[in-house]
């Protein structure tokens, strides 16, 4: 299956915390970072997720926010440090490729935000991803 989702990060499930409707699934990415995904309990069962399972964490590029440093005091659980590899800007939006340990991410943000953050190749950034915006896939 081919997907339009640019951000596809391989990892291993390290824990599953079930709930009545939703569950949180912790994933250790290939680069060693920990990621938390909030998915339905039904999806956990359908994918047969348990510690040790191989998964891909999928995130649409429009769901990745960028900061110039780690952010404290917020509910976003996933903060992946990296460096800007490339910035492509249009009249309204910018596509920012970020190198993280073990791979790359793409974030699509407004051109104004990219300009305000001063994003250029080599800039240090932190990719911020809400756990509810991460989907998991198995092979």
Image (cartoon, grey):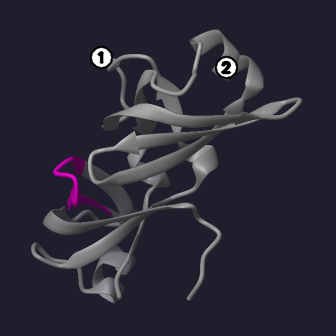
**Residue 126 percent across, percent down from the top left:** 39, 29
Q: At x 18% / y 79%, what residue is drawn?
A: 53
User: Magenta part of the protein: which range?
Assistant: 23-34
Dot 2 lies on which element? Answer: helix
Tell me which corner region of the image, top left, top right, bottom left or bottom right, holds residue 130: top left
Can residue 40 be seen in this snapshot?
A: no
Q: Where is residue 32 in the image (x, y as percent from the top left)?
A: 16, 51
The total of numbered circles placed on residues is: 2
Label 1 SS? loop
Which residue does the image show at 18% across and 69% down from the upper left? 12
Q: Which residue is the site of mark 2? A: 113
What is the distance, in whole Å, between disc 1 and disc 2 at their CAs?
20 Å
Q: Where is residue 17 in the image (x, y as percent from the top left)?
A: 17, 61
Among numbered discs 1 and 2, the one appearing first in the sequence: 1
Q: Is residue 42 left or right of residue 95?
A: left
Name the residue nearer the viewer: 41 or 49: 49
**Dividing the picture into quarters, in which one does residue 115 lie?**
top right
């Amino acid at each position: 299956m081919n997907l339009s989702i640019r951000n596809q990060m391989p990892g291993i499930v390290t824990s599953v915390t079930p709930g009545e409707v939703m569950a949180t699934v912790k994933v250790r990415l290939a680069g060693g970072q920990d990621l938390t995904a909030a998915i339905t309990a039904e999806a956990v069962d359908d994918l047969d997720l348990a510690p040790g399972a191989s998964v891909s964490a999928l995130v649409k590029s429009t769901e990745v926010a960028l900061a110039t440093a780690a952010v404290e005091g917020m509910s976003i659980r996933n903060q992946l440090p990296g460096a800007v590899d490339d910035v492509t800007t249009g009249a309204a939006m910018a596509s920012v490729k970020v190198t993280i340990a073990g791979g790359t991410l793409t974030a699509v943000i407004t051109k104004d935000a990219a300009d305000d953050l001063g994003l250029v190749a080599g800039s240090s950034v932190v990719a911020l991803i809400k756990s509810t915006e991460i989907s998991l896939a198995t092979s």
